[in-house]
């Protein structure tokens, strides 16, 4: 992943504390972050905190003699690949919409001509005020991206729309614009992720340890490359950007129905979900404890990948995963042939390579004519490798 430069603007709102997490997310991902803040913003967050988190001098006063950037508001905006204002008050939105530049942040905003994301945060009455909505629409018309506030507890005590979006969601949106390309533009990619949950009764279930991280990283990478991306996911705590159409499911049967419905419109399907092979017959009432043992009757679930392989049309690419603990390569090749796959990802889990929960993994990518064993790497990078190979398959088809 290429290192990018992110400029983050803060204004005077209680949500400013959340922006500390946003800075950390970008820094942890390896990106450079600089901060520009208003005088009122400094009433909520100190420059020391922002300097420590960003590792950079804070730009807070256009004319300060000790400010590293002095009056060079053009330089800092030229440096940035992405500008995010979070939280954005009604005041800063109004200034930008009307061309007012009277502090470090408003001056930088008027000098910036690349991707800008505004994250409003204010009382709901202020947010829905006609003047504020007019200013928002004006800026949207100029290409400014607004990340809508959420409903919930506001600082004033109300429960309404006006809370700044969560930092992780803003971060994921930012990554989309930082990484956007058009290499898969016009393609439809369907990805499955997460684990299925098979109910025993109203309070118990059987499942597995899959976190869904790999599938979500694949879907994100597909969206970055311009593909129309659909993510069918089982149980997971992962989040994705707003450019992915997410379909939540619970059981293997739920996932089967959702995937089959979406399959006919897909150019490529990547099935990374950990789908249960067997499911219990669910009891409508809680199963009471009795005796020293309990026999659990399981029935086989529909093999989604096999069903897709049967109905796959010419030109569609089907990618599966093989989680193995032994005879990995042999079992993966067998699965690839039996299920009519174009590519299979061999995931050999062991104590040295725990597949579940970690941000890292070691995989082998297998196609009909090639076996590529990759070293252990971040699942974000794994997603990139997989989508590179998918692009290669598309190019091969077009010859």
Image (tube, rainbow, N blue to C red):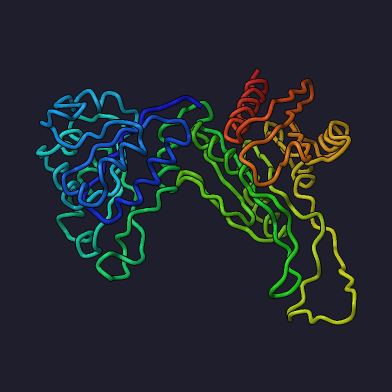
Frontmost residue, 34 versus 315: 34
How many labels, in total?
A: 0
Residue 393 x, y percent position in the rendering: 67, 25
Residue 235 x, y percent position in the rendering: 63, 57
Residue 114 x, y percent position in the rendering: 29, 30
Q: Is residue 367 above or below residue 249?
A: above
Frontmost residue, 112 versus 230: 112
**Residue in the image at 72% along x and 70% along y:** 204
Residue 140 seen in render: no
Residue 69 x, y percent position in the rendering: 20, 26
Residue 249 seen in render: yes
Q: Is residue 201 above or below residue 152?
A: below
Q: Quadrant of the C terminus?
A: top right
Q: Is residue 388 above or below residue 279?
A: above
Q: Is residue 32 left or right of residue 293?
A: left
Q: Is residue 100 left or right of residue 172?
A: left
**Residue in the image at 19% along x and 47% along y:** 93
Determine which quarter of the picture holds residue 72. top left
**Residue in the image at 55% along x and 35% along y:** 222
**Residue in the image at 70% along x and 57% along y:** 196
Q: Residue furthest top?
A: 399
Q: Is residue 89 above or below residue 184?
A: below
Q: Is residue 160 left or right of residue 244?
A: left
């Amino acid at each position: 992943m290429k290192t990018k430069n992110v400029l983050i603007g803060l204004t005077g709102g209680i949500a400013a504390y959340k922006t500390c997490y946003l800075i950390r997310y970008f820094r942890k991902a390896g990106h450079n972050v600089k901060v520009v803040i208003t005088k009122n913003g400094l009433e909520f967050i100190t420059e020391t905190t922002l300097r420590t988190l960003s590792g950079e001098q804070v730009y807070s006063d256009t004319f300060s003699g000790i400010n590293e950037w002095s009056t060079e508001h053009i330089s800092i905006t030229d440096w940035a690949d992405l500008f995010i204002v979070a939280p954005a008050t009604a005041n800063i939105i109004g200034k930008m919409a009307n061309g007012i530049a009277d502090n470090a942040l408003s001056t930088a905003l008027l000098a910036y001509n690349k991707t800008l994301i505004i994250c409003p945060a204010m009382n709901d009455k202020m947010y829905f005020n006609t003047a504020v909505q007019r200013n928002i629409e004006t800026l949207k018309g100029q290409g400014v991206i607004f990340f809508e506030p959420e409903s919930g507890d506001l600082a004033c005590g109300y429960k309404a729309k006006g809370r700044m979006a969560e930092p992780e969601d803003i971060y994921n949106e930012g990554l989309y614009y930082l990484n956007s390309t058009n290499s898969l533009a016009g393609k439809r990619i369907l990805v499955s992720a997460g684990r299925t949950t098979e109910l025993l009764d109203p309070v118990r279930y059987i499942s597995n340890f899959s976190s869904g991280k790999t599938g979500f990283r694949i879907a994100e990478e597909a969206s970055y490359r311009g593909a129309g991306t659909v993510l069918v996911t089982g149980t997971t705590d992962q989040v994705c950007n707003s450019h992915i159409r997410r379909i939540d499911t619970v059981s293997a049967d739920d996932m089967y129905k959702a995937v089959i419905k979406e399959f006919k419109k897909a150019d490529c399907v990547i099935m990374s979900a950990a789908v249960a092979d067997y499911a219990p017959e669910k009891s409508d009432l809680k199963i009471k404890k009795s005796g020293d043992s309990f026999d659990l009757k399981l029935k086989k679930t529909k093999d989604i990948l096999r069903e897709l392989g049967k109905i796959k049309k010419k030109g569609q690419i089907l990618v599966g995963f093989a989680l193995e603990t032994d005879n990995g390569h042999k079992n993966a090749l067998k699965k690839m042939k039996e299920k009519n796959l174009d590519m299979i990802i061999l995931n050999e889990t062991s104590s040295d390579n725990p597949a579940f929960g970690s941000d890292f993994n070691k995989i082998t990518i297998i196609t009909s004519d090639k076996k590529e064993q990759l070293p252990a790497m971040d699942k974000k990078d794994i997603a990139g490798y997989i989508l590179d190979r998918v692009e290669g398959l598309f190019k091969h088809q077009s010859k």
